[in-house]
Amino acid sequence: MTMQHLGNHIADFLKLMNERGYDGHFLCNSAHPGKLKDSLNQHLLDVLQGRSSVPPFFLSTYSLWRDEQSPYVRCDFKVHHSHSEGFRVEKMDITNGSSTGNIKSVTVPLGANIEMPYCEHANRMVLGDDRKRKIR
């Protein structure tokens, strides 16, 4: 695989994640904090030393964050890479948590990247839909 080929896969993956609303800061395998492009590039520099393929890895980001006292939603993406198809999210773990622990967690298996929920939908999966709770 050429670096240009990998660069195209990275660009496609960044576009997908941004289109789905995941545009904050990430951790890649619990390291390399920063924007997705920077985190992913640093991770790939580390793992491709002496290798010709990218092993599966995890990306983590907060899809909802206010402050340390408020509940949050964290999304963990298990990502695979293939030379022919590029980066593919195999599953998402979506967790609604707080400083006292996890409130609700959902695992979403994905057959293709097109099935990845948009950020707002992922948040609703663990927070519920406020519109349903309104008193009429």
Image (cartoon, rainbow, N blue to C red):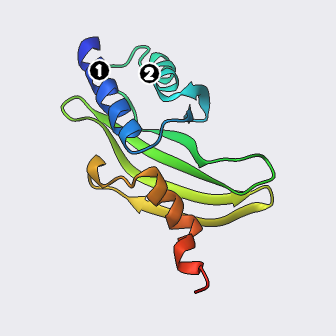
Quadrant in which residue 4 is drawn? top left
In the displayed structure, would residue 54 be above or below residue 96?
above
Residue depicted at 49% across the width and 29% down the height: 36
Q: Which residue lies furthest to the left in this view?
A: 84
Dot 1: few (<14), some (14–19), or many (≥20) neighbours within 10 Å?
Answer: some
Q: Look at the numbered disc 2 and give the secondary structure of its residue.
A: helix
Tag 1: residue type? Leu
Q: Please give left or right for residue 19 compared with residue 36 in the image.
A: left
Q: Look at the numbered disc 1 and give the secondary structure of its residue.
A: helix
Q: Name the residue under label 2.
A: 44
Tag 2: residue type? Leu
Percent across and percent down for residue 2 are 24, 13
Quadrant in which residue 80 is drawn? top left
Q: Are marks 1 and 2 in contact (CB under 8 Å)?
A: yes
In the displayed structure, would residue 46 be above or below residue 103?
above
Residue depicted at 57% across the width and 71% down the height: 130
Residue depicted at 29% across the width and 20% down the height: 6
Q: Name the residue under label 1.
A: 6
Percent across and percent down for residue 136 are 58, 87
> What's the CA distance linking mark 1 and mark 2?
10 Å
Q: Residue furthest bottom?
A: 136
Percent across and percent down for residue 133 are 59, 79
Dot 2: few (<14), some (14–19), or many (≥20) neighbours within 10 Å?
Answer: some
In the displayed structure, would residue 56 be above or below residue 135?
above
Dividing the image into 4 quarters, which one contains the N terminus? Answer: top left
Q: Nearer the viewer, residue 20 or 13?
A: 20
Q: Please give left or right for residue 92 compared with residue 6 in the image.
A: right
Q: Number of numbered discs present? A: 2
Percent across and percent down for residue 38 are 50, 21
Q: Nearer the viewer, residue 101 or 23?
A: 23
Q: Please give left or right for residue 64 compared with residue 66 in the image.
A: left
Is residue 133 visible in the rendered structure shown here? yes
